[in-house]
Image (spheres, coloured by chain):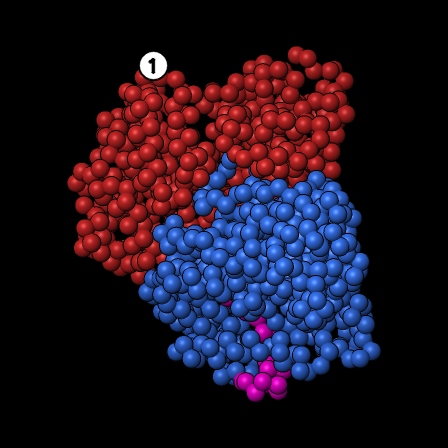
Chain colours: A blue, B red
């Protein structure tokens, strides 16, 4: 370990001996992401229990010229929260700062510390009859600070937006060790620059989120889940338009599942859609406080049959049946892993371009990476497709990435719809974003973190 | 006029002779805000017709060391879009860039140039059966660029958020004359810093918005409007909780109107509430695509009577009656003006603190500015109160401001909930925001506009 002894002493002085982790096996959970794709080697891990301690750690590391990697639940998919392999970076874990400070069921706000587990915050809102709509597979481990720093997406984005749209207030420790306290519980605040926006989605490269005020919503009383098969992606778009007409803004999920995805789920998870075969499937979820939701869903499905958009379809008659329909969607990733090696993409295009994107990306792969198979599924209602490619041992992941991302770029799309850039896509981003945008990002980074001490190497290179 | 002749020539060369205004009376509409509160004196007005021309103007002015004041519909309430009185600042009006480039009714996006009138964009969305929910009194003159630069609020914020939450993509000319093109029509994009957030709500001090992609929503089919009288502000909060329970997230307005406001409307506009007198009134608007809205509203009102929250109340039985209820709210400002001199405040506090705020601000005024009368009304559902004070000729507006804003600050509130800072509140902001936050704002300004050439003197002082 290359860490100076006096720095370790100063950190221990700030957070106490139990707040510093230096031992090899204890370091392991902080050193690598949960998928074990980005192994790193921290100088040590510091676990503060207050914002003041976070500020103190930042000041001490700054004086020592040591870089800090902030970490929440370490559930990210882009390697944004783990250190590099140099053994010189200090991991600052927020996992001892987990308090929920406040829930206001009428003002519809919740205030929580950065280390609070997302599920714990969801449950606190639910206990007061309200909804914290951020929901994702890792919600049992992901933290509020990580969710904010990553601008997390998830299954409710179509209706409630990304995490950004739910952040009302933020407390951030800046790279110079000062604390910017914007923990206002205000639904409207147009007084000066909304600086907190800089820290949402910047993956800990500009500041360390220590606490947040999030917006809650009334909890819908009724929900409806439907699975419908269609002939092709354009038909799925016509179904989306119908759903918008009948269900309005009460649709929370509009998921596209390819026949390939369904076949993988049948093969590896033993689950089968309870409707006739189709080339494509759409899973729709809607929820409302008003009665009339089921009737609107029936109207939508009826019209979809009448207009020959739906080949077959079913609306769940019970919570158990809704769960069975969702299980089909939820088992796609796992079934893909069992099938073999795959190269994943988390891309978005303007949603009405999804059919053309699927067609052109398929053609480009057939030409440039023959022998690959496409496993496409995802959030059609958001224009966000998990366009995963099943490959053989000889296919080059970089080549496959390049083929897919070039098509994404041609459609004005994004190479990271919800997972972020981290260290995983940092080179790709520089390739696809215009230099004006990259220069703007670097100007922001330089203004806030001129010495590049906060999560260096993530999101953008110097 | 102190403007260099060669600058004028270069500007004319860029935009043509009809694109430059130099004559006294022609300058007038650009020189002062519509309320005539902030008179200024431009060196000239330049009216580009393309983003390239905007970039050219910024480059030319930069070389000449001349400051630029971007201007949209000039409907702002904080003097943010008019020049100072020096006669040296160039007003850059976007009013020749008014095109709607694209409406996607299924992808739910609209792309418009900065000078497009808000109402024109609303109508374009409506023509495709969709809703652009930004709605405010000045919508017939306000422009998309101005609405974005000001992060405009309005009557639908409770349901759809401020303008920020509707911006998907932005094109901005930076202070160095380069063009940052982020006109992506993506609902999800987590690839790198979301730099566009910096320009939303920064009132033209960091860049000039030239075009935007905004999010649309399905247009609700049903609506309901109710007017209910209650004994006091805590009862209004209990009514809000009941409304959230019954109507969910389909409430678009929850407006509080004081008895004083109603009396002013009766006196000066001859309008009277069709329900029994009360100390406070609540106007509720909800809209939905689902049937069942009216039944839910009836349930809500029934429960409000049963729980002795409502003193009296009515649900509009027709569009005409709904308009009559809204007219009461809409005539408050005008009636206040007819009553005499007033000192206005656009403040927000955590919404469950509104009752205590009203009580403490009232006490503070009675002690510190005796003889004043409070005319309070506004967006209770957003915690945003227009806390206007009727004053006599001898009351000092600055003293009244200070008294009110000190109470706002004590509640962790904002001195500008929706109107922005402009030049109007620039001194007040520096007083009430913590130095860490002001330093952060100045660091952002320096990084993007180091020579302070873009809308200097607005939002923050150097």
Q: Is residue B352 left or right of residue A79?
A: left
Q: Nearer the viewer, residue B89 or A83?
A: A83
Residue B405 in percent (x, y) is at 42, 30
The residue beneath circle 1 is: B393
Q: Position of residue B233 (x, y in %)?
A: 28, 42
Residue visible at 29% across and 37% down in the picture: B257
Q: Secondary structure at mark 1?
A: loop
Q: Quadrant of the N terminus of chain B?
A: top right
Q: Residue at x 71, y 81 (%)?
A: A340
Give the total of numbered labels. Answer: 1
- The quarter holding residue B390 reads top left
| Residue drawn where x is 45% and y is 53% of the image | A101
Task: Report the span colored magenta.
Answer: A253-272
In the displayed orientation, state which residue is furthest to the top: B1
Find residue B398 and report its horizontal and vertical position in percent: 43, 21
Check residue A256 for magenta coloring.
Answer: yes
Q: Is residue B393 magenta?
A: no
* Whether residue A129 is visible: yes
Q: Residue lying furthest left in this view? A: B276
Q: Quadrant of the C terminus of chain B?
A: top right
The residue carrying pointer 1 sits among few (fewer than 14), some (14 to 19) or many (20 or more) residues within 10 Å by Cα, namely few
| Residue drawn at point x = 46 percent, y = 74 percent | A226
């Amino acid at each position: 370990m290359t860490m100076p002894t006096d720095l370790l002493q100063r950190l221990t002085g700030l957070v106490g001996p139990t707040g510093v982790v230096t031992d090899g096996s204890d370091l392991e959970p902080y050193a690598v992401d949960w998928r074990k794709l980005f192994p790193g080697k921290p100088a040590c891990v510091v676990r503060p229990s207050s914002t003041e301690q976070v500020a103190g750690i930042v000041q001490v590391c700054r004086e020592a010229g040591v870089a800090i990697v902030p970490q929440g639940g370490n559930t990210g998919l882009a390697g944004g929260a783990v250190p590099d392999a140099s053994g010189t970076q200090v991991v600052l874990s927020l996992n001892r700062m987990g308090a929920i400070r406040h829930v206001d069921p009428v003002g519809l706000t919740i205030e929580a510390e950065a280390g609070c587990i997302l599920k714990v915050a969801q449950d606190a809102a639910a206990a007061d009859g309200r909804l914290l709509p951020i929901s994702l597979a890792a919600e049992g481990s992901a933290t509020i600070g990580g969710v904010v720093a990553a601008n997390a997406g998830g299954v409710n984005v179509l209706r409630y937006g990304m995490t950004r749209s739910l952040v009302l207030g933020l407390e951030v420790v800046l790279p110079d060790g000062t604390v910017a306290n914007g923990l206002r519980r205000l639904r409207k605040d147009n007084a000066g620059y909304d600086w907190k926006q800089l820290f949402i989605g910047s993956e800990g490269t500009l500041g360390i989120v220590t606490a947040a005020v999030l917006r809650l919503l009334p909890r819908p009383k009724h929900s409806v889940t439907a699975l419908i098969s269609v002939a092709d992606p354009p038909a799925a778009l016509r179904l989306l338009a119908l759903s918008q007409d009948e269900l309005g803004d009460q649709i929370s999920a509009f998921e596209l599942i390819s026949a390939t995805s369904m076949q993988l789920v049948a093969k590896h998870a033993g689950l089968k859609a309870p409707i006739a075969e189709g080339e494509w499937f759409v899973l729709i979820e809607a929820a409302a406080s008003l009665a009339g939701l089921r009737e609107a869903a029936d109207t939508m499905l009826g019209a979809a049959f009448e207009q020959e958009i739906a080949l077959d379809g079913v609306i769940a008659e019970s919570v158990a049946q809704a769960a069975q329909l969702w299980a089909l969607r939820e088992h796609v990733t796992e079934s893909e892993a069992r099938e073999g090696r795959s190269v994943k993409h988390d891309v978005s295009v303007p949603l009405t371009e999804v059919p053309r994107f699927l067609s052109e990306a398929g053609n480009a792969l057939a030409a440039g990476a023959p022998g690959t198979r496409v496993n496409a599924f995802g959030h059609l209602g958001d224009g966000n497709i998990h366009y995963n490619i099943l490959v053989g041992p000889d296919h080059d992941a970089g080549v496959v990435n390049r083929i897919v991302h070039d098509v994404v770029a041609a459609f004005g799309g994004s190479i990271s719809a919800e997972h972020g850039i981290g260290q995983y896509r940092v080179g790709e981003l520089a390739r696809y974003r215009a230099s004006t945008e990259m220069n703007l990002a670097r100007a922001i980074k330089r203004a806030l973190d001129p010495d590049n001490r906060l999560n260096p190497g993530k999101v953008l290179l110097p």
